Image: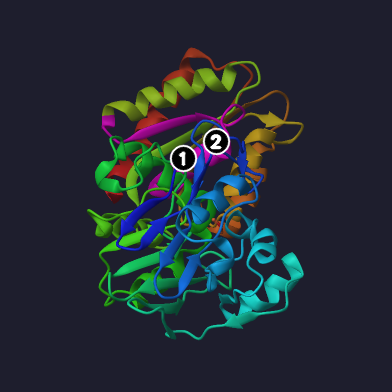
Amino acid sequence: MPAVEIKPNVYWIGVNDRTTDLFEGLWPITKEGVSYNAYLINDEKKIIIDLAKALKTDEFFDHIAEIVPIPEIDYVVINHMEPDHTGVLRTFRKMAPKAPILGSPKTKAMLESFYGITENVRAVKDGEMLSLGQMTLQFFSTPLVHWPETMMTYETSQRLLFSCDAFGGYGALRGAIFDDECEDLDFYQKETLRYYVNIMAKFSRPGLKAIEKLADVPVDIIAPSHGLIWRQNPQLIVNLYKKWAEYATGPTEAGITLIYGSMYGNTENMMNAVAQGISPTGVPLEIFDAARTHVSHILPSLWTKAGVMIGAPTYEGTLFPPMAQVLEMAALKRVLNKKIAYFGSYGWSGGALKHLQKIVEPVKWELVDSFEFVGKPSDEDLRKGKEFGAAFAELIKAQG
Ligand code: FEO
């Protein structure tokens, strides 16, 4: 995709990544892709805001050269040091050695540790302004959105906010870079939630602080470093981020995430009975097989829904390992304050429930009910399982 002018003399110069399988080496994006958005302002002073992963280096520098000869760039702003936005920095340095790198004070130290760059780096202060000629930038410190050094850059005359990771999402751009040109906003909203919970959720409190800090700053366009640029309805993405951040400690949606794992189908049979109990209550239900679904896709449901129904057998005296891995990641991501119920099969001794409680106790998941059975569930077990599912759903519904 060639560079796109998003406002007079302000250009999107990003690149799409449809070849990386795992974002951060961890989160699957094979089908969805991701974009690394960067921006160029061509004023009396010429400045680049954020860079890109060292992946499509030629394409990235070609974008810049379409507009400005690279050695004529006056500054580069690093809003965030993570290498998906800075991977081409050393190459850029060689091409434009005189352009100072601007970032937060913590960026300075990270530039040395990540890239060995110490020269011609300038730390900007929170609120500092930089005149480019007709346009003026202002820098806002927004620590821990996503890393400690993170900041955002605001252009005052055209009211553009370059927010980097904040307000971003998975999903390579499909020709359209703006929300109002996008034919499938549902896809980007879904992938933005997955990105939020995978990447940003642990930093929800700093995210809310940043939203509060910038609440009185007039913004016409939100230009993040991943996903769509929000110009028709920038408030939409702010409201979504705010809602998801508030889920970190506040009330969530009256729904149930049912995660199950099964070795020989016995716990799966019970899962179907439990789901039959939940379904007639009308409580929204999502079902995931822990062994066959990457946790990246389970986390959004866990984050947004109040109830978690966990079905897994005992495996060698512990919780079925794929389930333990899902719950351990949920705990790492600080998915807090859930109401949970557990069911599962065991062969000769239990142990799964005890292990489960150990994993979720630090994140304050409250076990409200449990139901274990030996081997294959009997007809009576399945009848009880249905009632067990219905009772849990009614409890979640009553909280909604
Ligand atoms: Fe898109 Fe935290 O990097």
On whether ligand 1 comes within 8 Å of the CB at mark 2, the answer is: no
**The residue stretch that appears in magenta:** 281-307
Q: Mark 2 sits on what residue?
A: 18
- Residue 215 on the magenta segment: no
Q: Which residue does the image show at 28% across and 70% down from the upper left? A: 159
Viewport quadrant of the N terminus: top left
Q: Which residue does the image show at 48% across and 59% down from the upper left? A: 165
Report x, y in % for residue 151: 49, 72
Q: Nearer the viewer, residue 106 or 399?
A: 106
Compared to residue 115, the image places residue 304 above or below, namely above
Compared to residue 185, the image places residue 224 above or below, namely below
Quadrant location, ligand no. 1: bottom right
Dot 1 amino acid type: Ala
Report x, y in % for residue 197: 48, 51
As helix, strand or loop, the secondary structure at mark 1 comes to: loop
Q: Which residue does the image show at 64% across and 19% down from the upper left? A: 375
The answer to whether 288 appears left or right of 306 in the picture is right
Dot 2 amino acid type: Arg
Of the numbered discs 1 and 2, the one sitting upstream in the chain is 2
* Residue sitting farthest toward the top: 379
Q: Mark 1 sits on what residue?
A: 172
